[in-house]
Amino acid sequence: MANGELSLTLELLNLLLEIRLAKQTNGTTPPNGTGAIRDLLLGLVGQPVTVTTPFGVITGTLLSVLTDYIVIIEDTGSQVLVRLAEIESASGQ
């Protein structure tokens, strides 16, 4: 798969996830504890961030903050989706 095809596939995946999550939440409030982290991250879009989860630490540029998850691009170019409910802490670099 060419790099352009991979990028397009990831964009389509993001769109489908966003649509699915929008249907699930349908205007409800986010899971407990995610509102404050989401608000913090909204102010960091486009900037380098460090996010701690039970699975490890993720660093990179915050691309977007969606209803239930965030999108980070790591220095390697890998795109990482992180559920807001799994974020223990987050900070700008």
Image: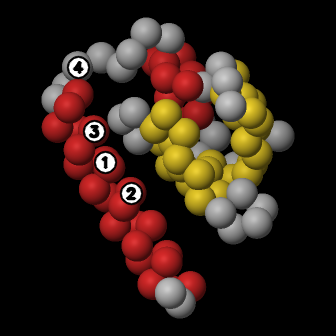
Gap in Å between the C-alphas at discs 3 and 2? Answer: 10 Å
**Relative to 71, 30 lies left or right:** left
Q: Which callout, 2 or 4, points at the residue further toward the start of the chain?
A: 2
The reply to whether dot 2 and dot 4 touch (C-beta < 8 Å) is no
Residue indicated by mark 3: 21
Distance from Cα at disc 4 to Cα at disc 3: 11 Å
Vertical placement of 52 versus 16: above or below?
above
Does dot 2 land on a helix, a strand or a loop?
helix
N-terminal-most mark, 3 or 2:
2
Task: Name, please, the residue furthest toward the top.
Answer: 32
Residue 13: horizontal and vertical position, in percent? 36, 61
The CA distance from mark 2 to mark 4 is 20 Å
What residue does disc 1 label?
Answer: 18
Residue 29 shows up from this direction: yes
Check whether the beta carbons of the residues at disc 1 and disc 3 lie within 8 A of each other.
Answer: yes
- 31 up-or-down from 51: above or below: above
Q: Is mark 3 on a helix, strand or loop?
A: helix
Q: Mark 2 points at which residue?
A: 14
